[in-house]
Image (cartoon, helix red, strand yellow):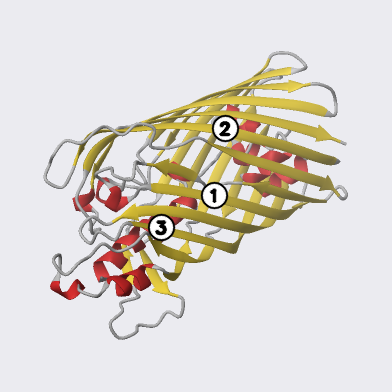
Amino acid sequence: MKKILTLTTALSVILLATNAMAAGFHLREQSAAAQGNAFAGATAGAEDNSYTYYNVAGLTRQKGTQVTLGATYIAPKATAKNVRGQNGERDADVENVVHAAVAPNFTISHQINDKWFIGLAGNSPFGMITKYDHDWVGGDHGITSDVKTATFTPMTAYRVTDGLSLGAGLQFQYLWAHLTSSHSASRTGIVSEDGHSWAAGYQLGALYEFNQNTRVGMGYRSEIKHKIKGKMKSSGSELTSSDNPYAAGQGAFIDNLLNQSIKVDLDTPAMLSFGAYHDINEHWAIMAEYQRVFWSSFKDLTFRSRDGNNKPGYDYIARVNESWRDTNFYAIGTSIKLDEQWKLRLGFAYDQSAVRLQHRTPRIPDTDRYWMTAGLGYQYNEHLSFNLAYTYINARKAQLDTSLTGNDGYNVTADYHNSIQAFAFGLSYKF
């Protein structure tokens, strides 16, 4: 029974953690304008108030009152090929593992005076949907994974000098997850876990403008400590005395064990970003970005019952070692002002995966990736502007071998081929 709990713990919490992590499932797409440059210079650009997601200090460049609304349609494609089960038997390839989703965002900012600026942002910075058939060979390690978040950030910024601005914000984040898996050895049917959490963190930023053409920025987003509460349910135990003498009469025992309230403590990683922006002339601008995501804080996972106590005959506690690594994100970009209304944006980025081969699961077929982006900005009048962006992400082939993860369940190996397309739209109105 301890093995069943350990397995469900690993599957549940890994995906929940994925929802709050950068690299593969951190949705950077919170600004259509910044996306056009592959988020190069996002912490220094501050071209509209949507850039405050990357650096809250950029509020001081937003004059008057401004509202920005946007959304990104993210269409990933992941195919599992050369799939092999416990004894090396070849299984069918799995198409369309990862499903499309929309990441909405909004930002409202207001200039109080020459020094003080305030704002409120709302977005969905983490999320994913993966689905396999219930009878696929890797069902022990994941069938359905559906994660959603909503984050609201009240913020303020202060212009210390003509060149230096500082900013801070509070992040209030809601996380929801629905997961399913099976357990072939114990034949407990389909096990599902549903959980949710409200948690808070903070955001800090600094912007320094050398002159009207050159500026640099720093942005920091803290880790968020989620205390996830939810339910574990099973479609029913199929164990009989012929399978295991101890299992005789234990169906109710197993059903009770797999139908209970659960808790998981999860600390998401901090992120530190640096960016630079420079106008070469009135038509050309260049920018660059670096981000470090501190994944090394994600060392292990702990699962427990509602009261957190062990009872005779029941093992309610399990701990899974994860040992993810810190990741790096690099981006360069350029913008070309075509005329007084139109601006073309281009960008390229390299995004490192937090998941190495020995920790990769079917729920997270993530690997290093390359971003290629293009965007178009249109200034309709002095009040209204629009931004469009397109991103193509090519990911390296990801190998899967669950025997290396240390998780229970039948072993499965596969080769994942991943790519992502993202289409973004943003509208800004200045009062």
Q: Which image quadrant: the C terminus?
A: top right
Q: Which of marks 3 and 1 is nearer the N terminus?
A: 1
Q: Which of marks 3 and 1 is in front?
A: 3
Count neighbours of disc 1 (C-alpha within 10 A) and say few if under 14, some if 14 to 19, many if 20 or more.
many
Quadrant in the rendering for residue 336: top right
Which amino acid does the dot numbered 2 rest on? Tyr
Question: In the structure shown, which secondary structural element does the residue marked by tag 1 occupy?
Answer: strand
Q: Which mark is residue 41?
A: none
- How far apart marks 2 and 1 lie (CA) works out to 14 Å
- How far apart marks 3 and 2 lie (CA) works out to 28 Å
* Percent of width and height locating residue 348: 48, 27
Count neighbours of disc 3 (C-alpha within 10 A) and say few if under 14, some if 14 to 19, many if 20 or more.
many
**Pick the front one: 176 or 378:** 176
**Which residue matches tag 3?**
192
Question: In the structure shown, which secondary structural element does the residue marked by tag 2 occupy?
Answer: strand
Q: Is residue 137 visible?
A: yes
Residue at (60% x, 61% y) in the render: 201
* Percent of width and height locating residue 15: 41, 53
**Pick the front one: 278 or 174:** 174
**Which residue matches tag 1?**
148
Q: Is residue 59 above or below residue 168?
A: above
Q: Which mark is residue 73?
A: 2
Asked whether, in this view, residue 84 is left or right of residue 380, the answer is left
